[in-house]
């Protein structure tokens, strides 16, 4: 998965480069900067002295010394002064400069802390959005695996309203499924299963909405595999393969595997990631999921959350992953 949000201590990440949220002097500070210098040892500070500081929004690179990471990219995020002093642009620039530097040094894996969100006071939810959007944009054009490392749980808060909306959606569906009588649960399970066997498009056909030719076409599609349906939908959407797998946050190798193996059976998160990338309406998302042998289950928080986004036609995979993370679920993608 090209962008992953993980909870960890960045100094332990085994990646090509970790990014340091430094200050302009590059001579060490508190927070993540202090932790990185402690873990890397004194040689890091010695090399930093030769760099003569770094401007806000820019980045410089050093070796990683005792860290498991080969490089440290030092970048300086903006101090939050209320949001009208160009903070957002500077924060975007800090992420972009770091990513460009990583690219120039052929890094394939890079880990970022949530820049500016500590002592520099950038509101955490906004800092997170800038990070996810900027890294996401960059990954549309470049193959790299980027980890956004969240240190403390408090740093990770999706918007309160979105959180409340999703919580209510889960309440309506998930809790329902868990408080039903056995008999009702059984009925639900059976109807979910029959949903897999009969795609919604077929149900529409049954309702007499199709012409005869459309019906034949739909019947032919019943034999389609997941891989075939995916490729057909990509063509129908008029997008390229790369646009699709990048939007799905799936790496190229996995996509090639799916492409070349007609009978490839993806994991449920992968199948759902493609449904989101293709911006399928809920019914079509169910069809695609069905091709991989899955159905939306209201007994799974993961499913209910993804269903929430699809039903609201919000296909921003990074936003969906933020929400999944906030609810302690695994993330969409490969
Ligand atoms: P800034 O000055 O840019 O705000 P800070 O170091 O104060 O930088 O904080 C940036 C973010 O890094 C904060 O969200 C903080 O919780 C987080 N952080 C602190 N230590 C670590 C660590 N060891 N690994 C990952 N993130 C960390």
Image: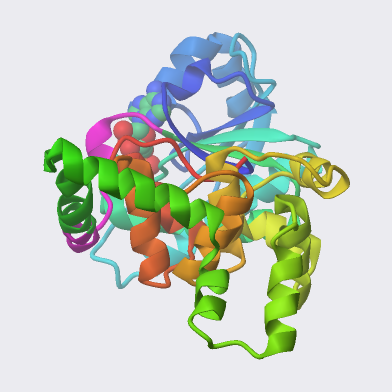
**How far across and how far down the image is residue 229, in percent?**
72, 61
Segment colored magenta = 150-165
- Residue 27, position in %: x, y? 48, 28
Q: Residue at x 53, y 77 (%)?
A: 206
In the shown orientation, is residue 61 left or right of residue 103?
left
Give the number of marks: 0
Q: Is residue 129 left or right of residue 258?
A: left
- Give the image location of residue 128, x and y in percent: 38, 51
For this rendering, which residue is in front, 99 or 307? 307
Task: Based on the picture, tell me whether residue 48 belongs to the magenta stretch.
Answer: no
Please identify the quarter of the rendering in which residue 198 is found.
bottom right
The quarter in which the C terminus is drawn is top right
Would you identify the image quadrant in which residue 257 lies?
top right
Relative to residue 28, is residue 104 drawn left or right?
right
Q: Which residue is drawn at 26% across and 33% down?
A: 153
What residue is shown at x 51% (from left), y 52% (from top)?
196
- Quick check: 118 above or below 170? above
Locate the N terminus and report the quarter of the image it occupies.
top right
């Amino acid at each position: 998965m090209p962008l992953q949000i993980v909870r960890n201590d960045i100094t332990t990440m085994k990646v090509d480069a970790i990014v340091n949220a430094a200050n302009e002097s590059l001579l060490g500070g508190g927070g993540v900067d202090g932790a990185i210098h402690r873990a890397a040892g004194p040689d890091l500070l010695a090399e930093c002295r030769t760099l003569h500081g770094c401007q806000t929004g820019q980045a410089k690179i050093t070796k990683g010394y005792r860290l498991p990471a080969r490089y440290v990219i030092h970048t300086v995020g903006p101090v939050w002064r209320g949001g009208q002093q160009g903070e957002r642009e500077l924060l975007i620039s800090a992420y972009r400069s770091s990513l460009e530097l990583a690219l120039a040094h052929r890094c394939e894996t890079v880990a970022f802390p949530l820049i500016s969100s500590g002592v520099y006071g950038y509101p955490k939810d906004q800092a997170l959005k800038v990070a996810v959007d900027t890294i996401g944009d960059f990954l549309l054009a470049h193959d790299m695996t980027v980890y956004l490392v969240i240190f403390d749980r408090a740093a990770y808060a999706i918007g309160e309203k979105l959180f409340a909306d999703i919580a209510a959606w889960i309440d309506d569906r998930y809790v329902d499924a868990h408080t039903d009588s056995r008999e009702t649960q059984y009925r639900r399970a059976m109807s979910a299963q029959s949903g897999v066997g009969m795609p919604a498009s077929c149900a529409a056909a049954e309702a007499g909405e199709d012409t005869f030719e459309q019906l034949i076409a739909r019947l032919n599609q019943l034999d389609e595999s997941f891989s075939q349906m995916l490729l057909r939908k990509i063509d129908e959407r008029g997008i390229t393969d790369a646009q699709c797998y990048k939007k799905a946050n799936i790496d190229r190798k996995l996509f090639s595997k799916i492409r070349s193996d007609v009978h490839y059976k993806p994991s449920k998160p992968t199948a759902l990631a493609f449904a989101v990338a293709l911006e399928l309406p809920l019914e079509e998302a169910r069809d695609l999921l069905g091709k991989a042998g899955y159905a939306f289950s209201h007994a799974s928080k993961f499913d209910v959350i993804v269903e929430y986004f699809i039903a609201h036609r919000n296909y921003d995979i990074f936003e969906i992953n933020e929400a999944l993370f906030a609810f302690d679920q695994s993330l969409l993608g490969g």
